[in-house]
Image (cartoon, rainbow, N blue to C red):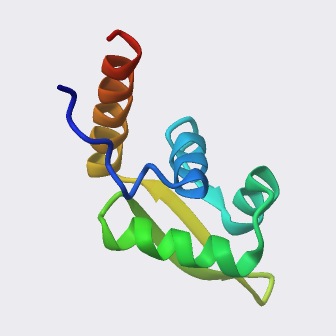
Amino acid sequence: MNKPLDPIIHSELRLAIISLLISVDEADFNLLLSKTNSTAGNLSVQLSKLEAAGYISIEKTFKNKRPNTICKITENGIKAFEEYVKILKGYLNL
């Protein structure tokens, strides 16, 4: 029997966010918003959940006097994503 999939990552939007962040050094809120086709409110909530789990770090700054949110995947996030993919592959190889 396979291990259960991580419920934090297994959400469609959170999986999209983690998948994008694993392939870049960092991404700002607007990039994540455009790539995920999410609403700003839903994206904000899902980013907070990923941050609370320790999977991403969020830095809020200002750029040209406007708020700028930068997201990066953490080492824990990379490990969790790799484990998620490993478990998922296990389901496919039944």
Q: Quadrant of the N terminus?
A: top left
The picture quadrant where one finds residue 67 is bottom right
Residue 83 percent location from the top left of the image: 28, 33
74 is higher (above) or lower (below) than 60 = above
Res 7 visible: yes
Residue 55 percent location from the top left of the image: 35, 57
The picture quadrant where one finds residue 84 is top left
Q: Residue at x 48, y 56 (%)?
A: 72
- Is 19 in front, or is 5? 5
- Is 11 in front, or is 17? 11
Determine whether, in the image, residue 84 is placed left or right of residue 23.
left
Q: Quadrant of the C terminus?
A: top left
12 is higher (above) or lower (below) than 65 = above
In the rendered image, the residue lying farthest to the bottom is 65
61 is higher (above) or lower (below) than 55 = below
Q: Residue at x 48, y 71 (%)?
A: 58
Determine whether, in the image, residue 19 is placed left or right of residue 78.
right
Determine whether, in the image, residue 15 is placed left or right of residue 81.
right
Residue 89 percent location from the top left of the image: 37, 19
Res 68 visible: no
